[in-house]
Each structure stands twice: as C-alpha cells, then as structure tokens.
Image (spheres, helix red, strand yellow):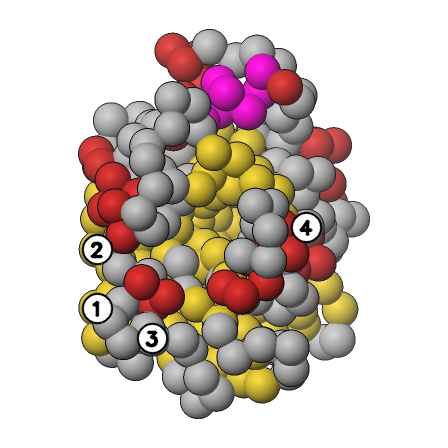
Amino acid sequence: MKFISFVRQGKPAIGTVVGEGVVDLSRRTGHVELGAALRTLGLDALKDTAAKASADFALADIEAWRPVVADPGLIACAGLNYAAHVAETKREATERPTIFLRVAESQLGHEQAIKIPPESAKLDYEGEIAVVIGKRGRRISEDRAFDHIAGYSCYNDGSIRDWQLHTSQWIPGKNFQGTGAFGPWLVTTDEIGERDVLTLETRLNGEVMQHANTDLLLFPIATLIAYVSTFVTLNPGDVIVTGTPGGVGAKRQPPVFMKAGDVVEIEVSKVGVLRNRIEAE
C-alpha cells in the first residue's frame, strides 16, 4: 500500500494511492498528518480503512505533494554508511553508526522545489532510502527491528556543504529550509520484504550520479534501528534515513553543485522516483 501526504483544495491531507486515484484518509479519519495518524490510530487501522474504500479523486487532482511524513517526532540520519562514500570523504569507517538529526521544517515533498539559500551556492544531492517507523519501541533488538517498520520511501538529504563543514558538527548544513526532499510515498512492508535488496540511484538532469544497493550498507537497516532506539524511544512516524553512497557532487573533480533549473531524481527499487527541481530561494 502507498501512503501519501498532499494538498488539495488548499488543505493538507493524507491518503493512499489506488491505481491513478487517491483514497482520502483525512476525510475518513480526521487526521491531516501521517505521523499523527500512525501514532493515534496505528498502521493496521489506516490500512484497513483504506482497503475498504474506493478512490475519491484522481491522483492528478492533488495540488501539491507534501513530505510523506510532515510531522515526524524524529528524523535520524546515518552518515558515512557506504564504503565508497567513506572513501571519497577521506574518512575512516566508524565502529558504530554516525547519526545526525534533521528537523521537520527542512523537508519538502515530491515535485516541490529544493531551494538554494542566498548564503551558499554549494547545494549538493544525497540520494538515500528512508525508513518510517510504524511501531513504538525502545532498545529494539536487530532480530525484531523489521517488526517496527511501517514502510520505505525515497529521500534526498540535500546538503549545504560549506555550512556543513563550518565545524565538526554537520547540523547547520543539513537543515536549511526546503533542502530535504521526502517522497513520493510510503510503501508499506507488505510490498517490500525483510530480505529484499533495494537499489538506490541518484540522477541529476538525467545523468546517473550515484548507484548502490542495501547490501552495501555498512550498518544495515536493522542495526540502525537497534542503535537509534537504544538512546531514544522510536515512535510511529519517526524517520531513519539510511545514508548516501559514493558519488556526491562535492567530491567530484571538478565539484558538481546543483544550480537553479536542475532536476534531481532519487529512485529506489520497489518504491518509486522522487523528483525535484532546483530553484534559488
């Protein structure tokens, strides 16, 4: 099942995609945010409500896509989680996952414009796979980690590289408003199995810039869930972004930073394609 967050008739809403149509879950549940709906009603109840309904309107009738989960309690991002990216940054692989946080206000949806801030021209792409939590848990063991996943989505961890490197703390460069793209939808785990290998590809203006799969993760998804849930309780709607492979623009020779008019696509097998144009803020 595919869950989406969107705007229609000027109002935020959530729903599921059925072919080329949308089941309006906001009309049926009163919830306009997917995170709140997952926390309050639960994934199974939302799926059951959607399964009993027919499409209310065409997918083409939505006015704008929003971040899949626009109201996460937590966005935990893994850095340096592919060997090729570790190598290109001239760093060393760490014994434990490298984790930093994003804020919800930095996110935007599918087909929305990623913004180049006036403070920098060094906007870089980072194609990633996002995991959305569906079941609350603390100190989750790796062998039970997949029981806590609601589903998967595409993520572009857009990074303002000079601000990221002002100090040893990456957070400023990872949280400029309108730089973290998340979508187009959440694909639930009944469509993606625990042992499925997902392929990730980033394209800039049609050219492949990054290509990898989840077999290459230094810290697999289950390990990330176990690690993050050790220091914080994971709640439905929380997001874990699993890291970017080699090929980022900042480490190319010459560097490739995104500019106004560019189009960046993140494709994850069995999920879909997240597409965003680039604009000056």
The answer to whether residue 272 shows anywhere in this view is: no
Q: Which residue is mark 3?
A: 256
Mark 1 vs mark 3: give the one in front: 3
> From the viewer's perspective, is the residue at label 4 or at label 3 nearer?
3
Is disc 3 surrounded by few (<14), some (14 to 19) or many (20+) residues within 10 Å? Answer: some
In the rendered image, which residue does mark 2 sit on?
Answer: 211
Identify the main secondary structure in magenta.
helix
Q: Earlier in the sequence, mark 2 or mark 3?
A: 2
Cα distance in 3D space between marks 4 and 3? 26 Å
Q: CA distance from mark 1 to mark 3?
A: 13 Å
Q: CA distance from mark 2 to mark 3?
A: 16 Å
Above or below — where is 218 with respect to 145? Answer: below
The one of 238 and 13 positioned closer to us in this rendering: 238
Q: Tell me the CA gap for discs 2 and 4.
A: 26 Å
Mark closest to the chain's N terminus, 4 or 3: 4
Q: Which residue is mark 4?
A: 103
Q: Secondary structure at mark 3?
A: loop
Task: From the image, state whether disc 2 or disc 3 is nearer to you.
Answer: 3
Q: Residue at x 30, y 80 (%)?
A: 205
Amino acid type at image mark 4? Val
* x and y, in percent, of residue 28 in the image: 71, 49
Q: CA distance from mark 1 to mark 2?
A: 7 Å
Residue beneath the point at 54% across and 74% down: 114
Residue 281 appears anywhere in the view: yes
Mark 4 or mark 1: name the one nearer the start of the chain: 4
Few, some or many C-alpha atoms within 10 Å of disc 4 (few <14, some 14-19, many ≥20)? Answer: some
Determine whether label 2 and label 4 are within 8 Å by CB: no
Q: Which quadrant would the C terminus be assigned to in this image?
A: bottom right
Give the mark, 2 or 4, whose residue is nearer the N terminus: 4
User: According to the image, label 1 marks what residue?
Assistant: 208
Callout 1–callout 2 Cβ contact below 8 Å: yes
